[in-house]
Amino acid sequence: MLRSAAGQRRLLAFLLLAFFLVYWIPFSNAFPGWVPLQFGSYRIFQATTIAMWAIVALGLNILTGYNGQISLGHGAFVALGGYTSAILIFDHNWPFWATIPIAGLLTGAVGFLVGLPALRLTGPYLAIATLALALSTPQILQKYEGLTHGSQGINIDSPTPPGILDGDLVHWINMDDTQYLYFLALLAAFIMTIVAWNIVRSRIGRAFVAIRDSEIAAQAMGISVPRFKTMAFAISAFFAGICGGVYVQVIGFVSPRSFDVLQSINYLTTIVVGGLASILGSILGAAVFVLVPETNSLLERLHLPAADQAPDVLYGASLILVMIFMPYGFAGFIRRLSRLQPPLVMQSFSDFFGQVGLRVRTIRSNAGGGGSGASDGKKRDGSS
Amino acid sequence: MELFLQQVLTGLATGAVYGLVALAIVLIYRSTDVINFAQGQMAMFTTFFAWMLLDGSFLGFHIHPLHFWIAFPLTLAFGIILGAVLERVVIRPVEGRPILTIVIVTLGLFSVFSGLATWSWGGIPKAFPPPPEIEVTGISFFGDGALDIGPTVISYHDLTIMVVAVGIMLALYAFFQYTPIGLGMRATAQNPVAARLMGIRVGNMLTLGWALSAAVGAVGGMMIAPLVLLQPPMMLGVLLYAFAAAVLGGMDSAPGAVVGGLILGIVENLVGTYTTEEYLHVDWFGPEMKLTAALVVIVLVLMIRPTGLFGRKTLRRV
């Protein structure tokens, strides 16, 4: 056994996660009633959606988190990928699996072209320029109806499990459509996670981070800033295109209304809430995003008036609270938990009240100093 | 030619609305580097407050309906307090964090205000009473009807909005240029550390920036509401155009915001008019793509001037 203890623990965690994702989520609905935590077909569909949005979040995180370029236009890339796949399937009878890589590559190429003018823009200017992309996409899709079938959209048949898997050949694997789509999305998300993982840990990823931290310093190190910035756009768009391709298979329908501006803004929210510059954060963000309506129905059971009357209020308020109390998003929160460090929440908590005027003794300030020892000690106990 | 002039005039009127909201966005951006996505919803919220005062049903209580010119300063005060409280309670805790974090917080505020408004007043559009008419040299501000300018006409309401936008801009210019507080705010925007060393209360200046911006937004909301009916999503379209206008003019320039708004309004109207079948005999473009055209113009301008028409170029020292 050459593996270190930490390595073994990581392997165990990975195997448990794999078991959960590949076996428990899709097949637990056939378990006997007394087994806890079963996933009905709606839950499986939700897991599928999480996998799907994780792909675009990974791509956007490479662009925004690692490379520091903001994009409010990723809905347009997802739309392009989705339409590419749908048109190839609907008008040209391609098999669905062949269209997804094509969708990714085409979108990546367009992303490269968008990245060229984006080179000159930063901050709010880039945000608005990319927002323009997202805003005009529905109009363009509606206008060129010869290609896109206009406002009625394109309906395709979602892929169904091939003969081997739906019980014809091997009767103990009986997979229905929902489970099959889940596996498709999971496979795509898995591959894209590996790809993202490798990109951010390669020379390219290090160049991205160097450019984000200081363009001038990166240039001095011999990194071609324009090349890597456009590359970040292309890679990011590639991810969004793949996500679009998977989206069409899962939903079975695209129309200009599928990709509105709010969607693009939500992608950005996803990665910031999940954790910028973090692979785990992208995935967690997607999960949080899909599961937010769930917490609402949870709160409804507590008879909070806002839960059923104004879910937006709770959503907005939780967004604000997450940003205040989890400065590095969910990924940062979990990272600290896994190291058994007290979450930053307590620190932010005292910062927060210190700033709005209610003085709460800070935990980190010099331990010996300060007069009111009693309250000081109490606070310290509470945090550690 | 008449049609052209008429469209330019109408464009100016639409553009003035964009410019007004863009002004509010620029005010916050200049002093705090934050793009406030909640600007439109804050304006909508304050406008609902004004509507309650005018309508006489204050959060379920019956009050005497107030006259417009009493409700107006009350609404401004409400806007100022709202902006200041938001800055203190919600924005201050994330101050100094990455810009994206703050942007997400404003997106959260966006949701909160949409939700609160729907919750308290419902989604049914309400008619917002226009302000009482004021006769100045034959022009009836806020009134019905239109003014003839040569061969073209402009409705009094559009004219009023333009006058108000320009008036606010001038007032803000005077405030920033000639008052000590304005000077302090400019100093804070330029270099917070140095400003603090000079004895400027930087925190107060930031709060004031939000308060001012909320007040400008409130005026914008009250100007727009009679035109589009008062309802929670009423500012969405305007907000996006206002962002575009602010960027077009340069995010740190107040006159730029108004000019950007006007240009955007004119381009939008002209494209909408001259790309119909009648004028343009192509099938790949049409008036329904006027938003796209306006956005293409903005992106093209940004290609040539990456910080907008009036924006200052930022130089960074290593």
Image (cartoon, coloured by chain):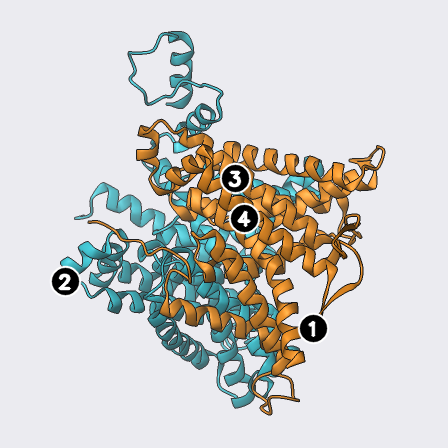
Q: Amino acid at mark 3?
A: Trp
Chain letter of the residue carrying label 3: B
Q: Secondary structure at mark 1?
A: loop
Say whether mark 4 and mark 1 are on the same chain: yes
Residue A329: horizontal and vertical position, in percent? 42, 44
Q: Which residue in the protein does label 3 denote?
A: B210
Q: Amino acid at mark 2?
A: Gly
Display colour for chain B:
orange
The label on residue B150 is 1
Of mark 3 and mark 1, the one earlier in the sequence is 1
Picture residue at 59% right of the left edge, 58% below the top:
B18
Rendered cyan, the chain in question is A
Query: Which quadrant of the view contains residue B311?
Result: bottom left
Q: Which residue in the protein does label 4 denote?
A: B170
Q: Quick check: marks 3 and 4 in contact, CB under 8 Å?
A: no
Q: Amino acid at mark 4?
A: Leu
Of mark 1 and mark 4, the one earlier in the sequence is 1
Residue B114: horizontal and vertical position, in percent? 65, 48
User: How far is mark 1 from mark 4, CA to CA?
Assistant: 27 Å
* For residue A237, side relative to residue A300 (left or right): left
